[in-house]
Image (cartoon, coloured by chain):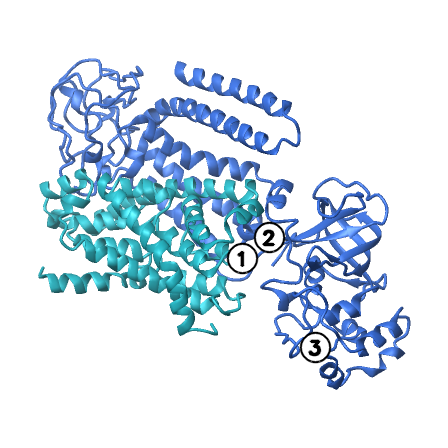
Amino acid sequence: MVRAVLFLAVAAGVYFLGKSLVGSLAADAQTARFWVSAAWVVATGALAWVGLCHLLQPVIRMIGLNFISVALLIFWGGVLLYFYYSGRVNVYLPDDGLFRPLMLAGGIGMAVLGVFNLLTGKVQAGCCGHDHGHDHGHGGCGHDHGHDHDHHEGCGHDHGHHHHEGCGHDHGHGHGHEHHHHEHAHAHGHGHECCGPDHGHGDEHKHEHVSACHGEDLVHHHHHDQSHDHGHDEGAHEHAHGILASPRWFNQSSAVLMLLAPLALAAAYTPDQYSAQAVLNKNLYNQTYGVGARADQFSLRTPEGKDKVPAKAAAPAPAVADMPPPADDSKKLPGAPGVATAEALAKTPEKAPGAATTQSYGSFTLADLEAQVPRNKNGNFELNVPEIYYTAGDAEVQKAITGQPIETVAQVLPEKVNNENGHRLRVFRLLVQCCAADARPYSVPVDFGKKAPEFKDMTWVRVKGTLTFPKEGDQIVPVIIATDIEETTAPADAMIY
Amino acid sequence: MRPKNKVLATVLSGFLGLVFPVCECAVVPVVRRLVRKGLPISCAITYLLSAPIINPIVIFSTLNAFKNVDASEGVLGSVGMTVARISLGYVIAVIVGISLLRKRPGDVLHRDIAAAMEKAPPESEGTAAVPGLSFNAKLVQAMRTAKDDFLDTAMYFAIGVAITSVFNTQVNQEMVEKAVAGNDLVAIPALMGLAFVLALCSTSDAFIAAPMAAFSSAAKLAFLVFGPMLDVKLVFMYSSLFRRKFMVGLCLAMFGLVAGLSVPWVKLIGQLFPTF
């Protein structure tokens, strides 16, 4: 206990010390900050871990490993079911496919397994049939067992603590076995066979059954010394217990902590969304506009899922002109600004633009755009960021959409590319391939022509403006020339599937 | 067993994952039990290495993850990558298994497992040994075993997930890609190292590999084959199953085989399935 407090206190000290140390570093000393922060986290974490293990160890002894393992199992199942039924899972897993049903099945399975084991804890279930390799016959004294063997799997005896029966000495186990609770007929204090098959166990040392033995209080509550390496072969415990039944107290406590802490902390504290730091680390600024695996899904030219086929060759003028222009009545469309220009552009022979990524897919006019993309009540084309992103790969779509009023809802982060004059912000949406773990940001710059307004990182905004496609670096970049930007509420699906 | 039969048995063990699918965490306790019941070492290890890859769930998820990747010169599409992963995983598992044909359990297994095996001959293992054990008792024991195995696996799983999530969100992916993606000589070991650190489940690691546009198909293949065979959590689990010396040799062999065979394998599969 003392050691636990000691370690935790030192951990807290290191935490605060490290915090101020990191804070004192210059904001842009990136490498230094990274390594110092990492060292700080590791040191604090390790110390806190050891302290918590010290704290956990007597608790494990008191409650007993069997109950703890059942409780952990029910805990895991419970967390899964909680996430499922509360709807928090909606952010993590797609609503179609097997993932959510599998999660439900898993949660139910774990809970059922845990409850089953809880209820059958006292049932005897045969013997493993193998020698555990510890000499139980030690009516001999003076050894520290300190391990919860829990051979209850079927061995019919609890090894952990009958050994001292013959000894009559202070074991310093702190098993908290309340040995007087044994229901087996043998009394304490005299050597008895460890393996008497009449012990219903599998239960823990939470021996609730009435003891017929004796009246003496044999509760050893003394906490003995932590080092229990009593020379038991660790491997000798190898009867499918795994690490939870390890004789080394630290391994055992660590195992329990590892099963408890991460899941509990995550379930309690996760905000169910990525942080700005995570988005920044996921190639936010390293976008290959117009190129990607989901071009067809987000192309403005096709309904979702249909393949678009690039026009042959690099769109030489004759090839394009040969294709019958669709919707020749586009010039008659009322109220559409710049229609005449767009139509004229659509009929102009195409030349393959500079960037290799922009391809020609055949004629696409404003009328096509109108057909595929709805105008919202403000008269603007409502696009999402991936759609804007992929326009950079399609020459005719670029021509059709340049200058058109568009609107998009996205999250905002500062712009760090081509932004020396501070006129730009970056907006993004997260795209999910399979589940939240593989989410990637698709982002485009927004240019204000003057100093960009300030927004808190990750704010949801509605941007209105027009699209332009300058060549920056060695690729075509779809830039939104903003006419308006305002905060807005997050859409129902924060991440796009 | 006569050597001829053992070779055949090893070769067939590589396919067991199709019938008994298991992920890479769960395979270790399963193999431990099988070995104690008398399965030859070569078969057991072949199953250990191949089952996390050659199983229906992994096949399905690999196909799905790469479905947006267009096959082209030197780039494998979804069918190509799936076939490459399965076949390379199988070949490596069988190679390792066959190289262990002559080994006795004592050379390979952790001394405590081997010792326990010697003390209690395999046949007496399990509830079958105890006559008259009722169905209920067997059920209870099975459920207890399931509980213990689950928690054991879940602990390693939690470790792997913790490492993965830190890496995924706190490390700048752009820096990682810039540093290693270009050159295959560097990219392949780098992605194998990533697979080791991330310790992803074989059923879903394809979804992490597929979008890594900067890396070659060979590097991705190495990631997908090496990960299920060896990673941070498997190191822990193997060390409870194998002797230390054997483990070191096994790890080196796996690393060498995967790193060496990835590039030629991509070429081979690319020729067999050029448009997939």
Residue A475 in the image, given as x and y percentages of width and height: 69, 59
**Residue B192 as seen in the image, left or right of residue A270:** left
Secondary element type, mark 3: loop
Say whether residue A465 is visible: yes
Residue on which disc 1 sits: B211
Query: Is residue A382 shown above or below A275?
Result: below
Q: Is residue A169 left or right of residue A360?
A: left
Q: Nearer the viewer, mark 3 or mark 2?
A: 3
In the picture of the structure, the residue carrying the numbered disc 2 is A440
Image quarter where the N terminus of chain B lies is: bottom left
* Chain coloured blue here: A
Asked which quadrant contains residue B263, the reply is bottom left
* Alpha carbons under labels 3 and 2: distance apart: 32 Å
Q: Chain of mark 2?
A: A
Residue at 17%, 16% in the rendered image = A142
Q: Position of residue A118 (x, y in %)?
A: 34, 39
Callout 2 touching callout 1 (CB < 8 Å) = yes
User: In the figure, is residue B217 to the left or right of A61?
Assistant: right
Q: What is the distance, in whole Å, between disc 3 and disc 1 at their CAs?
A: 29 Å
Give the label on residue A315, or none.
3
Task: Give the colour of chain B.
Answer: cyan
